[in-house]
Image (tube, grey):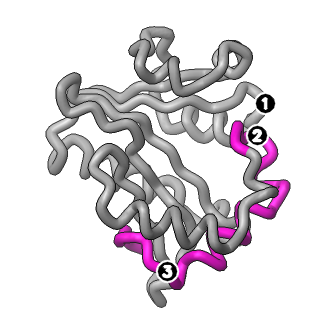
Amino acid sequence: MRLRKLEQKDAEFMLEWMHDESVVRHMSANFAEKTLQDCQRFIEYSQNCEEDLNLAIVDQDDTYMGTVSLKHINFQEKTAEFAITIRKEAMGQGYSAYGMQEIIRIGFEELDLEKILWCVSVDNQRAVRFYDKNGYQRTTDIPQYYKECYSDEQLKTFIWYVINK
């Protein structure tokens, strides 16, 4: 497995996880209404975006298994928000752990970030168990500019995690 830039050939597999209720049920966005064109536009956007880094997690045959991201990168504060999603068939195969480890390494080593945060719904017990089992630290110290990305109602149902350089 490895990370690479998103490519247009990933769009169909991206749409697959977006329309899989078992994958998206605890996510805040309404992925069910997304189209193939939405995926293609997101991939195009990702090619030159400076405030978000979105990479594909791929298998040995270069098949898209998921997306790992650093969003809302704040170079002044040296922070970013982590996000990941993978296709159902990739779950339990090590893609999440690999993608997370690599994007954090990129954030700290290549982008010179000092702190990476992320949130997960309390209802997403699979993700909560994964983060807790892997020793990621929970936090309540969330910068305001990340809180502003979510509604007050969402913020009440999130667990936040942080990793420092």
- Of label 3 and label 2, which has the lower sequence position? 3
Residue 84 visible: yes
Q: Look at label 1 and name its amino acid.
A: Asp
Q: Are marks 1 and 3 in contact (CB under 8 Å)?
A: no
Asked whether residue 85 is drawn in magenta, I would say no
Residue extent of the magenta highlight: 1-29
According to the picture, the residue beneath numbered tag 2 turns out to be 26
Please give left or right for residue 41 compared with residue 82 in the image. Answer: right
Q: Which one is in front, 107 or 11? A: 11
Q: Residue at x 29, y 29 (%)?
A: 79
According to the picture, the residue beneath numbered tag 1 turns out to be 123
The CA distance from mark 3 to mark 2 is 26 Å
According to the picture, the residue beneath numbered tag 3 turns out to be 8
Secondary structure under tag 1 reads loop
- Of label 1 and label 2, which has the lower sequence position? 2
The answer to whether residue 1 is above or below residue 112 is below
Q: Quadrant of residue 159?
A: top right
Residue 165 visible: no
Q: Residues within 10 Å of mark 2 (few under 14, many from 20)?
A: some
Q: Residue at x 56, y 65 (%)?
A: 66
Q: Look at label 2 and name its amino acid.
A: His
